[in-house]
Amino acid sequence: MTNSSNTENTPNTPESPMDIMRRARAQLAELTGMTAETVSSFEQTENGWALEIEVLEVSRVPDTMSLLANYQVDLDERGELTGYRRVRRYERGRADARRSEGR
């Protein structure tokens, strides 16, 4: 008897970048219980993938006062989450003030 599940991936089956991003958002949302809104950066690394994902941490009224956060998310080459950390937290209505980190 064979398993015909669509959720099973073989290690040799390449996934599209969109599939990787969707998988990362879903895994982060499941682990944190928060809504993953957007992927703001995405790159392939030696060990897999690195993404920065914007997450809604606290919903407020008006919406411009809601708290958002950026999370650095690391995935292995199959798209499985291997780690994450919050790198920034801010109110939705605030301008994006860049931190000076040599850039």
Image: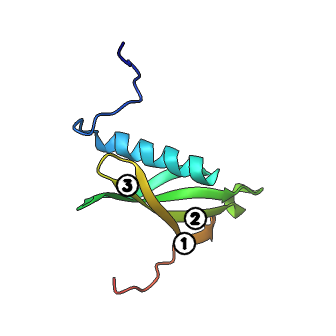
Residue identified by numbered label 3: 75
Q: Check contact, mark 2 vs mark 1: CB within 8 A.
A: yes
**Mark 1 surroundings: few (<14), some (14-19) or many (≥20) residues within 10 A:** few
Q: Is residue 40 above or below residue 96?
A: above
Residue for point 29% across, 50% down: 77
Mark closer to the observer (3, 2):
3
Q: Position of residue 15 (x, y in %)?
A: 28, 39
Three-letter amino acid code at the position of disc 2: Ala
State the CA–CA distance, disc 2 to disc 1.
Answer: 5 Å
Residue for point 39% across, 47% down: 21
Three-letter amino acid code at the position of disc 3: Leu
Q: Is residue 35 above or below residue 93?
A: above
Left of 26 or right of it: where is 93? right
* Quadrant that contains the N terminus: top left
Left of 90 or right of it: where is 81? left
Mark closer to the observer (1, 3):
3
Residue for point 64% across, 50% down: 33
Residue for point 45% across, 61% down: 83
Q: Is residue 4 above or below residue 26?
A: above
Q: Position of residue 97 (x, y in %)?
A: 51, 77
Q: Earlier in the sequence, mark 3 or mark 2?
A: 2
**Mark 3 surroundings: few (<14), some (14-19) or many (≥20) residues within 10 A:** many
Q: Earlier in the sequence, mark 1 or mark 3?
A: 3
SS type, badge 3:
strand
Residue identified by numbered label 1: 88
Q: Look at the image and tell me whether residue 42 can be seen.
A: no
The extreme top residue here reads 1
State the CA–CA distance, disc 1 to disc 3.
Answer: 19 Å
